[in-house]
Image: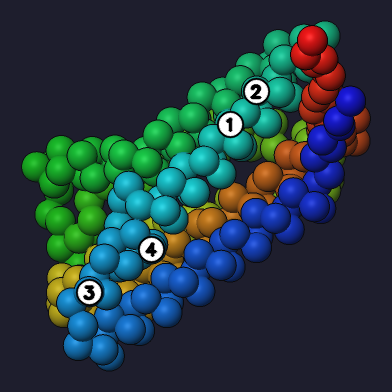
Amino acid sequence: MIEITFKPKKVGLSFLSIVVFLTLIHCIVLVSFFYLDNPNIFFFVRWFDLDIEKNIPSSYSSFAIFVCSFLFFIIAIHKRRRLDYERSCWFGLTVIFLFLSIDEGFQIHENIGDIAENHINATGFLYFPWIVPYGFAVIVFGLVYLKFILGLPKKTAVLFILSGTVYLTGAMVFDMLGGREAELHGFDSVTYCILYTIEEFLEMIAIVVLIYALLSYIDKQFGYICITLQVRDTKIG
C-alpha cells in the first residue's frame, strides 16, 4: 500500500519551483530572441513565452488554477453540516476558479474584450478592453464575498487577501501598463516584454499562495489530503 500525502508546505514549494523555472526559461528565451539573430529561437519562444496561449506556461497556469477550483470543491463538500451561506460561497469559488482555469487555457477574456471594444474607447490604459468587464466583476465579487472572507480564520483570510491583491496587481495593473506600452511602441518592445513578464509572474505566484492557503485550511479543518494506492501482486502460473 502506497500513501501520497499532500502537505501544504511541500506542495506550495513544488508549485513555486515550477513557477520560478518557467519564468527563468521564459527570460532566457526572450533575451536570446532579442539579442541573437537566429530564427530557430522562435520555436522556443512559441513554447515558453509567458504571453502566448496554448503552450507550456499557459497549460501550467490553467492546471494550477484548476487545482484551486478542486480544493474549493473539496472544502465545499465537507461543509455539508454548516450554514448554507458558507457552503454556497465555497461552491461559488469552485465555479469561478473553474471558469478562470478555462479562461487561462483558451483566452476567453480576449473574446470578451473584443465585444467590450465595441462599446468603449480602447486606448491608453484600456488598450486591452477586457479589463472593463472583468474589473466590474471584481468589484461585484468583492462586495459579495467580503463578509465571507472576513469570517475565515485569520491566517486563511490574510493569505486569501494577499493572493487576490498580488493576482489583481499582475492581471489588471500591469496589464493596463502593458496595454499602454503596446499601443505606443508595439508588442515587440523590450518594455512591453518586461511588463507582461512581471504580470504573468505575479499571477502565478498568487495562485501558489492560494494553493498553500487552501491546503493549510483543509489541513487545520479536516486533516491533510492523502491518496492511498493499493498494489496487488499478480502471480502467473
Would you name the residue on which mark 3 appears?
Answer: 40
Check if mark 3's residue and mark 2's residue have beta carbons within 8 Å: no
Q: Residue at x 39, y 43 (%)?
A: 104
Would you name the residue on which mark 4 appears?
Answer: 48
* Disc 2/disc 4 C-alpha distance (Å): 31 Å
Camera-side residue: 52 or 170? 52
Q: Which sits earlier in the primary sequence, circle 4 or circle 3?
A: 3
Foreground tag (2 vs 4): 4
Kind of residue sitting beneath label 1: Ser
Camera-side residue: 152 or 227? 227
Indicate how the structure is coloured in the image: rainbow
* Disc 3/disc 1 C-alpha distance (Å): 38 Å
Would you name the residue on which mark 2 appears?
Answer: 73
Would you name the residue on which mark 1 appears?
Answer: 69
* Disc 4/disc 3 C-alpha distance (Å): 14 Å
Q: Residue at x 86, y 30 (%)?
A: 2
Check if mark 4's residue and mark 3's residue have beta carbons within 8 Å: no
Label 3 residue SS: loop
Side of 26 relative to 85 (left or right): left
Q: Is residue 23 above or below residue 84?
A: below
